[in-house]
Amino acid sequence: RHASDDVARLDRKRPNYCPLWPQELVGRLSEDSFHASPLASRTREAVDSGGQYRPGGCVPREKVAVIIPYRDREQNLKVQLHHLHSVLQRQNLQYGIYVVEMAYPTPFNRGLLANVGFLVASDVIPYTCYVIHDVDLLVMDDRNLYRCGRVPRHLLAHSTKYGKLPYVAYFGGVVALKERHLRAVNGFSNLYFGWGGEDDDLLTRIFQVNLHISRPKPLIGGFYALQHQKDSGNPVNQKRDILLKSAKERMFKDGISSVQYTLLALEKRPLFTWVYIAVNETD
Ligand code: UDH
Ligand code: NGS
């Protein structure tokens, strides 16, 4: 028996994993791709209904659900979807895109929408990685892989909005967490109605279970911030500082385990799965 036979046998058994660094990556993306560039027909045709994709020639290393909390940003969404499908296909990932929208009149609640996105998506496919993604931020370099790591990952190292992070402990915009990370912290709080604080609350939860976070290097970690109108249904949340003070105590009773909502629609659209919910604001 020769060692080379053993290697050959092992090779036959080992799945044909997609490369760690896919050859299709182009690196830094040109400004043109940040404006409503049409989706290449090859890219569009590769997407299954509901915005699902899996690479043809290799076994993907990660199954990623991209969850976009959403309301009234139609133009941003269109640009984002075209951009994301192109980038994620080049990254050789299996992925699904979930746009989770909240009905009026309730003030917008990004954390709650992310929790619902997680629950709905995990019911469709057992994803290994969940990326919570603002609709208006476009990844500027496709080497910034939409994958999860040993610890929760802030995929955004800086954006064109600030030129750098607004503060060191910022964990907003685009974050990637494994299923076990999300379960360990009980997801986001459901209590942040209106603008601000839910991302800081999530980071408090992460530290509380002795995890830390990672970020890509600045060279590849940039995001391009799209313009948008001022939101009508997302007033600054005046209670956010008070809520943040009790983040640690609340975390195991307020989150994925307790989210309440009414599912108004769950539709497979050509480029994404639309999850439309109604929520009553709680005090
Ligand atoms: N979002 C919507 N619609 C809304 C509100 C929020 O889709 O009406 C989603 C969207 O994915 C957005 C994310 O929630 O990217 C975060 O919203 P945001 O308003 O916190 O962030 P954004 O960068 O705008 O879009 C910043 C407004 C700054 C308000 C400053 C108050 N001091
Ligand atoms: C902080 C907010 C975060 C927010 C960040 C950047 O002040 O939720 O600003 O916001 N925290 C609190 O309000 C407690 S940004 O300017 O990008 O909209 O993510």
Image (cartoon, grey):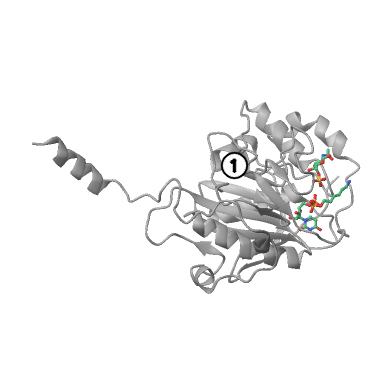
252 w.r.t. 128: above or below: above
159 w.r.t. 261: above or below: above
Residue appearing at x 80%, y 59% in the figure: 227
Residue appearing at x 60%, y 56% in the figure: 120
Quarter of the N terminus within the rendering: top left
The residue closer to the viewer here, 160 or 187, is 160
- Residue 234 appears at what percent x and percent y? 85, 54
Quarter of the C terminus within the rendering: top right
- Residue 19 appears at what percent x and percent y? 41, 48
Ligand 2 sits in quadrant? top right
28 w.r.t. 188: above or below: below
The disc labelled 1 sits on which kind of residue?
Answer: Leu
- Residue 96 appears at what percent x and percent y? 55, 59
Q: Is residue 124 visible?
A: no
The residue closer to the viewer here, 180 or 200, is 200
Q: Is residue 136 left or right of residue 228?
A: left
Q: Is residue 73 left or right of residue 28?
A: right
Q: Residue furthest right?
A: 238
Q: Is residue 78 visible?
A: yes
**Which residue is the site of mark 1?**
177
Q: Is mark 1 within 8 Å of ligand 2?
A: no
Q: Quadrant of residue 192?
A: top right
199 w.r.t. 42: above or below: above
- Residue 251 appears at what percent x and percent y? 71, 34
